[in-house]
Image (cartoon, grey):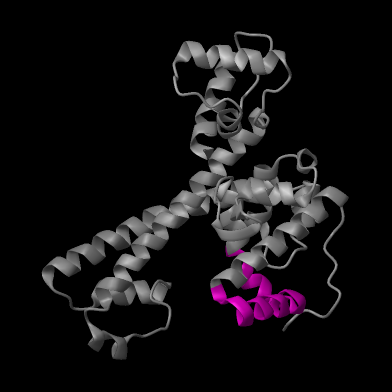
Amino acid sequence: MLEATRNWTVMHDWLEEIVDEVHLAHPVKVKAIAEAKIKTDKIDARVLAHLLRTDLLPEAHVASPEAREVRSVLRQRMFLVRVRTMVKNRVVGLLDRYPELSEGRPCKEVFSREGKEWLKQISLKETDRRMVDEDLRLLEELEGHIDQSEGLVEKLAEGDWRVDLLQTIPGIGKFFSVLIAYEVDDIGRFAHEKKFFSYMGLIPSTYSSGGRTFHGRLTKQGNKYLRWALVEAVWPAIRTDRELRAYYERIKARSGANPAKVATARRLATIVYRVLSQRRSYRVSGSRLP
């Protein structure tokens, strides 16, 4: 759904230049309202026209051109970080074939400056040696591009009240605060926090029949970048905030680690919603963990 919305956003930019008014329809909601057995462009156009005429057209939010441009840069940085992680995992997986090397490792962190020098000098099979060398060169390229993006993040963070407030939340540093600020865009478009959860796909699928209700896995229909940021922020958050740590441990004891992580991410989403909608910093009721 998000990919479809993003493609239509590009179309929206083009249409804005040639017409007076553009409405971006939400594809999933339109399908739910007007699903048909026979589907053609002509029929779709007529359905959309009727929905617009009767003020029933479910519209998707379109961020400002500036916000969309920033999102593209931030998402590119996230992509590069994911690729860097994949490359590191490849190298670590290859080293697992050589258990004898663990004894001669000069440092704990393989990808530190000292660790990389060690990786360049260790004796490996010819094919493995070539793969490690190629991956190390790729890592250097990726890290160079990631470092270049740091300047933009710093610039975007300057003077933005949203970023300042978001950084008061445990687990949310400068990059996550900038990412959340521009992915949310305007927190006022969410009537309440449950709408915000739904936008991120941080709600369970629900099946109700015969008076019985079952909750399944996360819908994951929504903004995957916000969902990723809040899930990733869970670990640093529970390491520094006593209340969040206690909340995580309570859910973990009852339901397991993964449900606890998702529930804590949803708790962080609640904090984000209230911090932005009320324009106030996060206040810790207890002391922070050391």
Image height check: is 248 above or below 69?
below
Location of residue 47 in the rendering, given as x and y in whole percent from the top left corner: 58, 16
Q: Identify the residue at horizontal 53%, vertical 45% (top origin).
A: 75
* Any part of residue 219 in sight: yes
The residue sitting at the bottom extreme is: 103
User: Was residue 248 drawn as part of the magenta stretch in this picture?
Assistant: yes
In the displayed structure, 256 sits above or below 205; it is below
Report the residue that reaches farthest toward the front: 210
Residue 218 on the magenta segment: no
- Which of these two is toward me, 46 or 224? 46
Q: How many marks?
A: 0
Main secondary structure of the magenta stretch:
helix
**Residue 280 picture location, percent across and down:** 87, 56
Is 197 rendered above or below residue 261? above
> Horizontally, is 255 left or right of 273 in the view?
left
Rendering quarter of residue 84: bottom left
Q: Nearer the viewer, residue 79 or 1?
A: 1
Q: Nearer the viewer, residue 128 or 188?
A: 188
Is residue 154 at all visible to an observer of this figure? no
Quarter of the view holding residue 20: top right
Residue at image coords 65%, 45% = 199
Please give the range of residues in magenta.
232-257
Q: Quadrant for residue 140, please give it.
A: bottom left
Residue 44: give x, y in percent of width and height. Answer: 52, 17
Estimate the x, y position of residue 132 in percent, counting from the top left.
Answer: 25, 66
Q: Quadrant of the C terminus?
A: bottom right
Task: Please tell me which residue is depicted at 40% across the width and 71% down the height of the picture.
Answer: 111
